[in-house]
Every structure is written in structure tokens, then in C-alpha cells.
Image: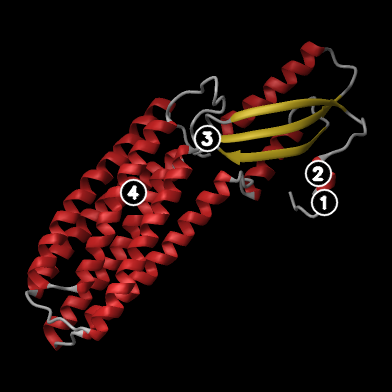
């Protein structure tokens, strides 16, 4: 985790990111509702439905972030970090629901066309929505980059989709206004729905991976093993297991040392290794088991021989 932020700063910025998201999603919903009433555009309806799902998802993110920041308890000694992954899964469900609704509306509109009117109002509203959304995305990506928050990442993903859909809707309204091609509005809505479904799958897939404790990337694993092997007194390392607790990395590993070392010296070497890892990945949780070098035992690495790292 490449960040030098303090834990307090991380917590504050996570809250700012999800609070701003809730406020903006409500504002965009009201703006698009006005534009929908003025134009009757199905493309704007698709964006309105997405904004409605954004409101629910952003509120879920807000609650999840607050919950995840709770300290460890007697019943949850790893803390509540994974609440963020659960929120991402809920968000994916809402995005998928929005996509299916818009898809149904699009198919129905093909068979029951409605004349699009007041396209100028729609263009202005969608353009303003686009600018506000870009500002929020910039801030959320800044926060996600420094906190690795799954909830903020998932929330930001909504608005990345919004940018693309807003651009396509503005284009659609221009086509309807200038060329009078009414069906282009419906086509835009259907394409938006497909994009929503794709994003829902991606978010859900990443959230499920985290909930099932998928290993961190090979680069992280290699880096940790190299740091251990380069630590004075450590003769080898094996059975490294990693996971993401919700922006907080967890490392569990066995290190091999001279079996004749005193307990105090073995402890000092272990502390040195832990410090190296925590400097590279601030706020990480590290659990190191000490083994005498050369002792034969059943190892996880031997059971997983096909793994690269």
C-alpha cells in the first residue's frame, strides 16, 4: 500500500469522499428529474435511474465506511474493514437492477415511441451534471489512491460510468435536436444499460474476491518475500499468505532462522522484518511465525506447487 497518510487522515478523507457522493447524487437526481419532465427522453430516464441507484449506493457506502472505521472488538478481532466490500457488493446489485430496468424501458420504447421535446434543456442539465461528476471523480480517485478504500473505489466507479453515459446522452439529444432521429435516444438508453450491467459485474467480482480473501497481487507478494530474505538473520521464508481487509493489508508468513539463536535475538530479527513490511505498507497487520532453518515440515508452498509466487 503506497501511502504516507496517517490513519486519522485516511479516516477523515474516506468520510469526505462518501459524504460528497451522497450530496451530489441527490442533486443530480433532482436535476435529471427536471430534465426528464421537460424532455421525455428515455436516455435521460436511464441516467435518472442510475442517479437513484447512486443515492442508495452512496448511502450504503457512507454507512459502510463509518462501520469499517470501528476498532477491533471482542467478537471481531480483525476489525470491521470488510464492511466496505459488502457495501461494494450491494452497490453492484443496485447498478445491475438499474441496468435491467433501463434495458426493459428501452425495449418497450422501441415498440411504443414517444416524441422527444425541449432537447435544449436536457443538454444543459446533462452538461452541468457532467462537470459536477468529473469534479467528484477527481476527488474520489485521489482519496482511493491514498486509502485503497473499496467503498470509495466502487462509488467512484458509478460516476465513471455516469461520465460516459452523460456524454452519450448529450450526443443523443444533439442528434434528436438537429437530425430528428428519435430512435437514437432509445438506442443510447439500451447501450447505457449494457454498460451498467458490465460495471456491476466488475464491481461484484472484485468485492467477492476480497470477501473470499483472494491473495494480493504478485508484485506485493514478491516485494514482501524479498524484504524478508534481505533481512539480516533470516535464512528463508515460506507459506506467505496475504489478504486485503478493506484497504488494510494483512500478511502471514513463516521465516527460517538459525535454530541456536536465543529467543531474544529471534524476536529482534522478527521485529526488524515486521518494521520493514510496515514501512512499505503502512497500517498493515503482520503475523510472523519463526521456524528453525532446515526443519522438515508440511508446508502450504509444497501443496501449492503450481503457484508462481
Horizontal arrangement in the rendering, residue 243 relative to residue 252 (left or right): left
Secondary structure under tag 4 reads helix
Q: Relative to residue 75, is residue 247 depicted above or below? A: below
Nearer mark to the viewer, of 4 and 1: 4
- Residue drawn 7% across and 68% down? 38
Mark number displayed over residue 87: none
| Residue indicated by mark 2 | 301
Q: Earlier in the sequence, mark 4 or mark 1?
A: 4
- Residue drawn 33% across and 39% down? 62
Mark number displayed over residue 57: 4
Q: Alpha-carbon neighbours of circle 4 within 10 Å: few (<14), some, or many (≥20)? A: many
- The CA distance from mark 2 to mark 1 is 6 Å
The reply to whether the C-beta atoms of the residues labelled 2 and 1 are less than 8 Å apart is yes
Mark number displayed over residue 248: 3
Q: Alpha-carbon neighbours of circle 3 within 10 Å: few (<14), some, or many (≥20)? A: some
Mark number displayed over residue 305: 1
The reply to whether the C-beta atoms of the residues labelled 2 and 3 are less than 8 Å apart is no
Secondary structure under tag 1 reads loop
Amino acid at each position: 500500500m503506497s501511502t504516507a497518510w496517517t490513519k486519522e487522515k485516511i479516516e477523515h478523507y474516506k468520510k469526505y469522499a462518501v459524504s460528497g457522493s451522497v450530496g451530489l447524487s441527490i442533486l443530480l437526481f433532482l436535476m435529471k428529474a427536471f430534465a426528464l419532465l421537460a424532455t421525455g427522453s428515455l436516455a435521460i430516464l436511464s441516467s435518472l435511474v442510475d442517479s437513484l441507484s447512486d443515492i442508495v449506493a452512496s448511502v450504503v457506502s457512507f454507512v459502510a465506511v463509518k462501520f469499517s472505521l470501528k476498532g477491533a472488538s471482542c467478537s471481531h478481532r480483525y476489525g470491521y474493514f470488510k464492511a466496505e466490500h459488502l457495501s461494494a457488493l450491494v452497490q453492484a446489485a443496485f447498478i445491475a437492477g438499474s441496468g435491467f430496468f433501463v434495458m426493459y424501458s428501452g425495449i418497450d420504447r422501441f415498440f411504443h415511441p414517444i416524441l422527444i421535446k425541449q432537447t435544449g434543456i436536457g443538454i444543459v442539465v446533462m452538461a452541468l451534471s457532467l462537470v459536477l461528476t468529473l469534479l467528484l471523480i477527481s476527488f474520489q480517485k485521489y482519496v482511493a489512491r491514498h486509502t485503497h478504500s473499496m467503498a470509495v473505489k466502487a462509488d467512484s466507479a458509478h460516476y465513471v460510468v455516469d461520465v460516459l453515459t452523460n456524454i452519450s446522452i448529450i450526443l443523443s439529444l444533439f442528434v434528436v435536436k438537429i437530425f430528428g432521429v428519435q430512435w437514437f435516444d432509445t438506442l443510447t438508453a439500451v447501450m447505457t444499460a449494457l454498460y451498467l450491467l458490465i460495471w456491476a459485474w466488475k464491481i461484484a467480482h472484485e468485492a467477492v474476491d476480497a470477501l473470499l480473501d483472494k491473495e494480493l497481487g504478485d508484485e506485493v507478494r514478491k516485494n514482501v518475500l524479498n524484504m524478508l530474505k534481505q533481512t539480516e538473520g533470516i535464512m528463508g521464508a515460506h507459506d506467505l499468505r496475504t489478504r486485503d481487509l478493506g484497504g488494510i493489508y494483512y500478511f502471514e508468513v513463516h521465516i527460517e532462522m538459525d535454530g541456536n539463536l536465543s529467543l531474544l535475538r529471534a524476536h529482534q530479527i522478527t521485529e526488524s522484518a515486521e518494521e520493514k513490511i510496515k514501512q512499505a505498507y503502512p497500517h498493515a497487520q503482520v503475523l510472523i511465525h519463526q521456524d528453525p532453518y532446515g526443519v522438515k515440515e508440511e508446508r502450504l508452498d509444497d501443496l501449492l506447487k503450481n503457484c508462481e509466487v
